Amino acid sequence: MTTMINNSTSAFYERASLGIGDLRKRAETIQTQLGSGQKLARSSDNPVVASRLRQLARSDALSEIDKSNANRATADLNLTDQALTSFNDYLQRVQEIATAAGNGTLTDSQRAAYGVELQGIQSSMVALANSRDSAGHSLFGGEMAGQPYSLDGSGNAVYSGTASAGQISLGEGQSVTRGLTGPEFLNFSVNGTPTDLMAVVKNLADALQGGSSDPAQAARDSLGALSTGLDKLTTAQTVVGSRLSWIDLTTTHRTNLTELRAQEETDIGATDIPTATAQLSQMMTVLEASQASFVKLASLSLFNSLS
Amino acid sequence: MASDLLSIGKSGAQAARAALDVTSQNIANASTDGYVRRSVALSEVASAGGIGQTGDISLSGVRVAGIVRNADTFRQSEVRRTGADAARANAEVAGLENIESAVEGADTYSAIVKFEGSLQQLAADPTNTSLRASVVESARTMASSFNVASQGLDSVRDGLQFEANDGVDQVNKLAQELARVNLRLARASDASSDQTALLDQRDSLLQSLSNYTDISTTIAADQTVQVKLGGTSGASLVSGGTATAFAMTTAGDGTISFTLGGSPVTVAGGSLAGKAQALTKLADTRSQLDTIANNIMSTVNDAQAAGVALDGTTGQPMFSGTGAGGMTLVLASGDGLATAPAGAGANSRNSGNLDALRSALSANDPADAMDKTIFDISSTVQGRTISRDALVTIANNAKIALSAQAGVDLDQEAVNLVRYQQAFQASGRIMQVASDIFDTLINIR
């Protein structure tokens, strides 16, 4: 067998096509990255980054829901705050009436008229205590369905809701109590006897309308209970305000995290346009050069020179 | 005086003619796959003088001693070996990429995240019918994306098995063809042109065979080849004029194994080995997917049974079936979601059971398991792609090395064409001289 130094034509073409094909493939990969704006076309391009991107997308999706939950909690707490302000207004009017009715110079019929107004205020308070939240559920009934307060046979408001309002998740393991139950801001005790604001108003209304032998004294006696009720309301409003600011705080935190995630997604997943463009034009230069040199070499054949 | 100028010239012309034939055959087959460059081996025809006649000139010209086939058997076996490795890696990576696409393309991960998110949203308002409906719909999406992933894996498995089956048929066909070539080689006379064509055929059959499976070859003195599977000590696929039947068996989990003549044989290279490896990974991926689907189903169904639906009755199962392929949503409407704990009345806004479900799901973390599954398969693809690229480069280099040595160089053939043309003309000139000499002698008066 003869062995000789031999550069076969097919080997030349094979080498050239492998080289040029490889360059083309690399140029196309960069082109795809530029076109899609993403470094990864499929997970196997970089499994670690792809997995991180999936986790970031998951956090983003869940964070969106946390955001809507936080908005819902904010709406409910704002409604609670407004209702508490209305209770406050009513209570001030009741205090005015109690002070006026306590004046001994009023006639019984004048006191009875005050009594009628108080009755109206009491039923307004019951209606307010039955108001709805942003989703149409009772605002002060805790987790119950339907209306938490109803009137019994003698016109007293009776609470039938649950003991506490539910928690709502704000994400990152944080949560907030979404509202207040009626008893949490309406119930208090006077001289060790538990009562509630609406009962106090009802009793005063009854007393002024002839239910008591000394209505003026009853009106003066009720002032102490009313001021305790006012304290309770003010405290409740402070609680609601601090919950709202807690939601604000977690929202700011969440927004920061979302920005960080977006930054990380861009850093690890997005195509760096300037670098990729530079790489592409470098690749194109090499590709053009090798194509040109291939054409030149391929046209070199001894057959052309033999005649 | 034994020399004859005319017959020397004739033998020279014949030899040059034969060389020209071989050269043009080379040029014609410059780009034929598997063609090995031929050259003519010439030898002088001369005899020493007999006893007492040692000084005599006894020259009879030249003869064609044979057609030389410039194949380097080492490079050829390197091409087969590296080609089998590259074919295996290519088949494995192609199969793995399809598995990756099936699992990733079904978008099961984001479907699980959506389901998780819909539960989280429902917790804000457990009795809201549209939020309940959204949970049921995202559960349906999740179940169908598991189904799609499973069907994707099914079709990848079917495709791989079909190709492997076809590969086994090809191996049998090639083995039978090789056995026939062996028979003809054993009968053909040495160094005839016919035998070089047979040798080309033998080598190209061996190369085709090495694309499907790794083979070890032994070439006998009569140029027939013995082919073994499973290493040099393995069983023989082709021996002389006999080919042994090669077959494939499919296991219940879709993985494949091979037998040669009825007894098991290990195939370590070639596309068949690659497909077998991809099928093994596929079975593994499927069991991971099934585990995730079963976990989700049992967690959700257990939670459903522990709570009460919107109408206060005990919760009914949300999913039925087993595995990713069988996962079916059976809960008819969102009202059936058991968000409230057992004992709570109808229309309860108590989200105790929903919270329990969410914490059970987050302890189980199917999204994370899915992420791991995708990571597992995609990092396998990535790792295998790197080694595939290396193996393909090695195989390409071996192929170029072989074709550089055994292929046709057109420039060289052009030179040969001129050279043998001149030799032919020169031999013609010798005959002219012989004729002139004869004329000289005959003109003496």
Image: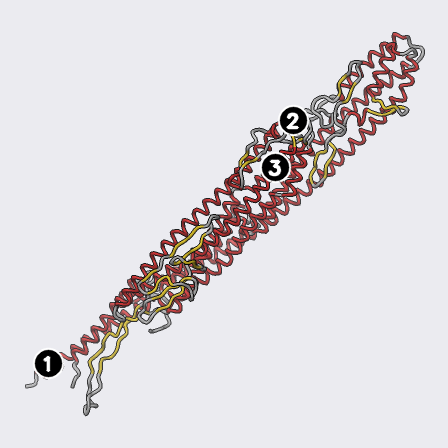
Residue identifier under label 2: B312
Residue B133 screen position, x and y as percent: 59, 30
In the displayed structure, A297 sits above or below A90; it is: below
The mark nearer the N terminus, 1 or 2, is 2
Residue identifier under label 3: B300
Kindly indicate whether the residues beneath marks 1 and 2 are on one polypeptide chain.
yes
Figure quadrant of residue A67:
top right
The secondary element bearing badge 1 is classed as: helix
In the displayed structure, B372 sits above or below A231; it is: below
From the viewer's side, name the closer residue of B397 and B429: B397
Amino acid bearing label 1: Asp
Figure quadrant of residue B186:
bottom left
Q: CA distance from mark 3 to mark 1?
A: 114 Å
In the displayed structure, B166 sits above or below A129; it is: below
Q: Residue furthest left?
A: B445
Amino acid bearing label 3: Val
From the viewer's side, name the closer residue of B177 and B47: B177
Q: CA distance from mark 2 to mark 3?
A: 18 Å
Residue drawn 22% across the image and 70% down it: B17
Please state if A178 lies on the left or on the right of A224 as rendered: left
Mark 1 in CB contact with mark 2 (< 8 angstroms):
no
Residue identifier under label 1: B439
Residue B118 screen position, x and y as percent: 62, 35
Between circles 3 and 1, the one closer to the viewer is 3
Q: CA distance from mark 1 to mark 2?
A: 130 Å
Between circles 1 and 2, the one closer to the viewer is 2
Mark 2 in CB contact with mark 3 (< 8 angstroms):
no
